[in-house]
């Protein structure tokens, strides 16, 4: 049953090196690395030289190679590699969330056209097998929402800030030293990285392809000491939450920091761990927790994809085939705390439903229901902080309502 | 691709009725109930009479029926139904953990012999897709342990006792009213139900078939008010934990109540929720949380199995094919608190390593390392309480050690 697949790797960083060792040590996966394409010519590498090439075509045009494993940082180069590989009749494993989020619909279409699969479990929440579960287990379920902590480095930072009272800068530095933060930390702290993952998750949860630029992301880089104090006084922690849900025939999705009550299971998800919570009509609430960053957790997901290709596994995009009339929308109001340092920046009229306001330590707060578009505009103004309330989104689950009627 | 499978049901309780409705409402699963075998002739039922039969052979011998969905309580009758169905060339979906735990090796062999699958995701931790994940996602991983809260009704009882200060009896009664507790509550409170699930999980985690009677189960029915007080004073909660792990070529597994530190993610798993934690070398720690009891969560898992049969899914028992030299063993010492009401019952010499002892409110405690066999003997003596310490088992993960060497 198991074939001995020949692999062509792109990139030989932590994940690639881990993969090389694992393939030589485990007998569960049949796969042999034939060639590895790397960029830098003058690096000393821990395995024999004959494995390496600097010419991508040596791999992409090799008829002996069955699977391209793409593990590089550069999203544009990754896009070229993945699309060429598909056209050349090769299966692909990638963990490049930015590239996938930007080109998912095209990559879906290319898979249909060329009949070769692209698997990317490693792209969404590292070791958590969320895509496979969405594809396999939830295909018969009426899913109402998916949400959680989709970024390990910001969660690490927030944990250090809350649990160990470290400063934001100190915590960020530590996250980067440990390799949790992306090379460009703004991708993490401004919420782009979790947004890319959310875009991919939305396709597999609701069958809708949405462009990353259409999804609102608000980061944790504006959280002030006063916000932290407010959280602590109210027994809240703050988490960067990515979420998407279905309501009245529309799909909503966004990334934003949120106050989380200490009794919420997400509050106990610490450090570089990620968490994904899926709500459906029959399975009800499911929570998956696992490491979302680091070379081994990601490597584990990549390895699992290679293993799945051994038995010709392919994402079926079942929700996309089932629900084609769903549309993505940002036309939504949520409950949020807005903190600001100067009177002119925020006013009551910015709210759809103003609830309360107060001032403390030279800073003002306003709390109420506010539109996503207004939040996005605020997120671009210095001196304004945005944190969703613990019950920011009370998704009236269509699925559950449907069930109650039945 | 999708076939319109014909189903024959056994049992029409909550799960069966839910399934009937779901199959008529979701378009994700192709499946049609042809006949339902029930026991009681004089019940009024909510769907047309022509669906029902009282003769099991009318279903088992019907060549038109592809899948037998077995949802009855009686393990012996279920065994007859499942084995006959396989011999008659039918696929089977069942959620009967007792029957599966008692006959798993035989059912595995019958699947090989007759070439038809038996799926039973609903048998282990309700809605949590743990078996599918163990089969699919962890097949390439070096798993070191699986543990968690495998029983919803005892977790409900313990939650009520700890969070709402209800008495044990009151909490048990409430659990039964809500339908979380099995019809015979001793299966839950004495730890048999989680043991059956553990036996099934061990087969899919480590590839070892073990008989339920060889696995030690200690229940929560001996927990005294003094034990509760001790827990609260130390900031612990108590959970009934099922666990299995691999160490030095052996597999160990048992069910016992355990003090859990409040910072442990398992402490936040409340009410009828279940949790499964899997540790492996590459994915590291994965935690799955979901509803473990109730008709919809179980129905969701059953439905998912039916859906999987649409594309000829079958458990491959990969670990069983890979690791055939592993053996199950009870030759292990764990750290435990033993409470007892009379001097003669427990002595220091019962411990492999005695650590401390004290008396309070007419009851005595001893704490130390003690063999599993001694614990089992104690569990049969009135007036002795057994609760594992928070760090009862510090599993030196072989998998992780292996990795460190690599």
Image (tube, coloured by chain):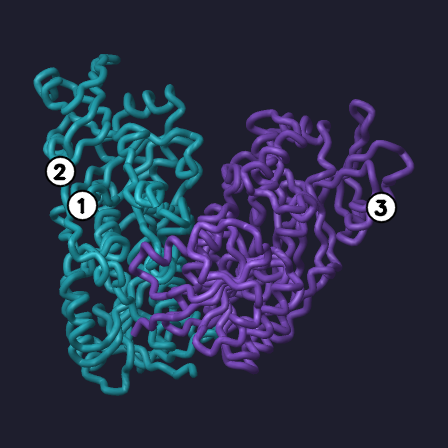
Chain colours: A cyan, B purple
**Residue at the (38%, 23%) spot, across then down:** A232
Which residue ends up furthest to the left in the rendered image? Answer: A344
What label sits on residue A250 in the rendered view? 1
Do the residues at pointers 3 and 2 share their chain?
no
Q: Using the image, name the chain to which the residue with label 2 belongs.
A: A
Instruction: Determine contact: label 1, label 2, CB under 8 Å.
Output: yes
Residue A273 vs residue A389, the one in the foreground = A389
Instruction: Determine contact: label 3, label 2, CB under 8 Å.
Output: no
Q: Which residue is denoted by mark 3 in the rendering?
A: B350
Q: Position of residue A88 (x, y in %)?
A: 18, 80
Q: Using the image, name the chain to which the residue with label 1 belongs.
A: A
Quarter of the image where one finds residue B171: top right
What label sits on residue A331 in the rendered view? 2
Disc 3 crowd, CA 10 A, few/some/many (<14, 14-19, 20+): some
Q: Is residue A86 left or right of residue B311?
A: left
Q: How many marks?
A: 3
**Residue at the (10%, 33%) spot, across then down:** A377
């Amino acid at each position: 049953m198991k074939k001995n697949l020949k692999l062509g790797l792109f990139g030989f960083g932590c994940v690639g090196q881990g993969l090389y060792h694992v393939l030589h040590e485990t007998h569960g996966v049949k796969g042999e690395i034939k060639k590895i394409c790397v960029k830098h010519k003058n690096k000393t590498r821990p395995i024999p030289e004959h494995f390496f090439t600097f010419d991508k075509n040596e791999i992409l045009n090799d008829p002996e190679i069955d699977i391209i494993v793409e593990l590089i940082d550069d999203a544009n180069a990754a896009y070229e590699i993945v699309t060429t590989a598909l056209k050349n009749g090769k299966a692909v494993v990638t963990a490049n969330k930015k590239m996938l989020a930007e080109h998912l619909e095209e990559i879906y279409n290319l898979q249909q056209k060329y009949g070769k699969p692209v698997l990317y479990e490693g792209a969404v929440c590292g070791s958590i097998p969320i895509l496979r579960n969405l594809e396999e287990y939830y295909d018969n379920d009426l899913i109402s929402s998916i949400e959680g902590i989709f970024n390990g480095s910001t969660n690490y930072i927030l944990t250090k800030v809350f649990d160990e009272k470290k400063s934001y800068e100190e915590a960020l530095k530590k996250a980067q030293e440990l390799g949790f933060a992306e090379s460009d930390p703004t991708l993490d702290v401004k919420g782009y990285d979790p947004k890319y993952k959310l875009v991919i998750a939305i396709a597999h949860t609701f069958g809708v392809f949405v462009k990353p630029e259409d999804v609102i992301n608000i980061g944790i880089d504006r959280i002030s000491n006063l916000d932290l104090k407010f959280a602590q006084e109210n027994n809240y922690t703050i988490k960067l939450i990515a979420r998407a849900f279905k309501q009245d025939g529309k799909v909503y999705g966004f990334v934003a920091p949120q106050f989380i009550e200490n009794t919420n299971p997400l509050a106990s998800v610490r450090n570089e761990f990620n968490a994904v919570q899926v709500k459906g009509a029959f399975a009800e609430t499911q929570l998956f927790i696992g490491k979302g960053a680091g070379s081994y957790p990601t490597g584990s997901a990549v390895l699992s994809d290679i293993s799945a290709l051994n038995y010709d596994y392919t994402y079926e995009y079942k929700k996309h085939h089932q629900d084609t009339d769903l549309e993505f929308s940002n036309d939504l109001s949520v409950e949020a705390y807005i903190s600001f340092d100067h009177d002119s920046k925020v006013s009551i009229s910015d709210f759809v439903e103003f609830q309360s306001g107060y001032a403390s330590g030279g800073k003002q707060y306003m709390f109420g229901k506010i539109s996503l578009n207004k939040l996005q505009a605020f997120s671009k103004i210095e001196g304004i902080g945005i944190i969703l309330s613990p019950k920011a989104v009370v998704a009236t689950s269509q699925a559950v309502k449907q069930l109650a009627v039945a």
